[in-house]
Image: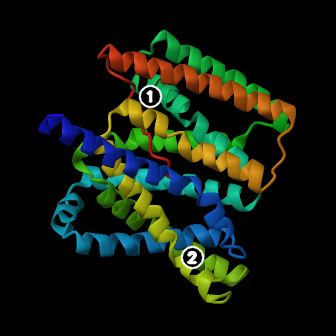
């Protein structure tokens, strides 16, 4: 093996390690958030925002990245774009944590299974992109899956749809700033915008239900404070992986997180899975298979693959 080939192999191997680590961490998030009970979803998300900002401040200092971050603060377009992105990720985080602590982990997993298909759909609606036949088929099959799941749930799977569309729109918004904002700076800007909301949220929770931070146990306090780390670290791992791996690799690895969440919901939390729900998930997986095969074919033919936002930010 020549030196360039060896370097490329090592580069991709490290990329795989980063990617798998990121999606494994995202996959076990339901267990992490459930360990924070008796904290409620509103308190968990508020502390998640505050401690994420704290982690980002420390990380920017350690990495000596304040100068780069400072330049972003002078760009009004970037600031406003990241503010909108922050609002969308707040909806995503809050919905996900509410779903987790209320026993809807499986439906939350569904949201991230259908997210790639929703992203393709939004590309048509918002960016006027032209889809290949296989992509249209995948979108059509996923619509059938939602109908089947609606019958299974007795109503539309709102949690899954909110998660999928909020994260899909989040990805589209962040594309407006492209490569100008790195993962750490992006999370810092988003949590800066959200911190006032989080503070108000903590005040309301404190007045109505009472805050749990520091009142349950040392272990509980550490885990609650660690919500910032569990938010930022996989995002940084994902950013490192995306720089090292082709899109087709990331396209497959992205299913790790919702698959793990699905297993947690079914096998560990024993959430109900009647036959029509299994059927709905099976149809979703067929749609994802079609989308994945199309991604491979497009990559081999050298055609431009769909620009999916593959991160599993929960």
Q: Is residue 314 visible?
A: no
Q: Are marks 1 and 2 in contact (CB under 8 Å)?
A: no
Query: Could you say whether the residue bearing mark 2 is in a helix, strand or loop?
Result: helix
Q: Residue at x 32, y 20 (%)?
A: 304
In x, y percent, where is residue 214? Answer: 60, 89
Question: Which of the 4 image quarters holds residue 146?
Answer: top right
Left or right: 281 in relation to 72: right
Q: Most extreme residue toward the front, as rendered?
A: 1
- Disc on the earlier residue, 1 or 2: 1
The residue to which callout 2 is attached is 223
Q: Nearer the viewer, residue 179 or 79?
A: 179
Q: Nearer the viewer, residue 167 or 254?
A: 254
In x, y percent, where is residue 80? Answer: 34, 53
In x, y percent, where is residue 297? Answer: 41, 15
The residue to which callout 1 is attached is 126
In x, y percent, where is residue 209? Answer: 73, 80
Q: Residues within 10 Å of mark 2 (few under 14, many from 20)?
A: some
142 relative to 100, above or below: above
310 relative to 196, above or below: above
Question: Which of the 4 image quarters holds residue 147?
Answer: top right
Q: Residue at x 45, y 69 (%)?
A: 229
Question: Which of the 4 image quarters holds residue 236?
Answer: bottom left
Q: Which mark is residue 204?
A: none
Q: Residue at x 65, y 88 (%)?
A: 217
Q: Where is the N terminus found, in terms of image quarters? A: top left
Query: Could you say whether the residue bearing mark 1 is in a helix, strand or loop?
Result: helix
Q: Most extreme residue toward the top, as rendered?
A: 133
Query: How are the colours assigned in the image?
Result: rainbow
| Front of the two marks 1 and 2 | 2
């Amino acid at each position: 093996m020549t030196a360039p080939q060896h370097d490329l192999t090592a580069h991709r191997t490290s990329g795989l390690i980063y990617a798998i680590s990121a999606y494994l961490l995202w996959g076990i998030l339901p267990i992490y958030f459930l360990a924070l009970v008796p904290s409620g979803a509103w308190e968990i998300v508020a502390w998640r925002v505050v401690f994420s900002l704290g982690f980002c401040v420390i990380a920017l200092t350690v990495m000596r990245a304040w100068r780069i971050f400072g330049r972003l603060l002078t760009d009004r377009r970037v600031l406003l774009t990241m503010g909108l992105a922050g609002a969308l990720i707040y909806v995503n985080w809050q919905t996900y944590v509410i779903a987790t602590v209320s026993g809807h982990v499986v439906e939350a997993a569904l949201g991230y299974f259908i997210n790639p298909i929703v992203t393709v759909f939004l590309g048509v609606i918002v960016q006027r992109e032209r889809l290949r036949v296989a992509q249209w088929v995948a979108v059509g099959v996923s619509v059938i899956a939602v109908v089947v799941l609606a019958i299974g749930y007795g109503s539309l799977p709102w949690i899954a749809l909110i998660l999928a569309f909020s994260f899909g729109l989040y990805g589209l918004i962040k594309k407006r700033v492209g490569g100008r904002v790195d993962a750490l700076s992006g999370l810092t800007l988003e949590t800066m915008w959200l911190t006032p909301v989080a503070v108000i949220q903590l005040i309301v929770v404190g007045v109505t239900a009472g805050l749990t931070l520091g009142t349950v146990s040392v272990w509980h306090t550490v885990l609650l404070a660690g919500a910032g780390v569990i938010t930022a670290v996989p995002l940084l791992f994902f950013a490192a992986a995306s720089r090292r791996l082709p899109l087709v690799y990331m396209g497959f690895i992205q299913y790790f997180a919702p698959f793990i969440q699905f297993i947690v919901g079914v096998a560990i939390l024993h959430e109900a899975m009647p036959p029509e729900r299994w059927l709905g998930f099976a149809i979703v997986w067929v749609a994802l298979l079609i989308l994945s095969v199309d991604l491979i074919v497009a990559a081999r033919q050298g055609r431009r693959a769909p620009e999916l936002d593959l991160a599993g930010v929960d």
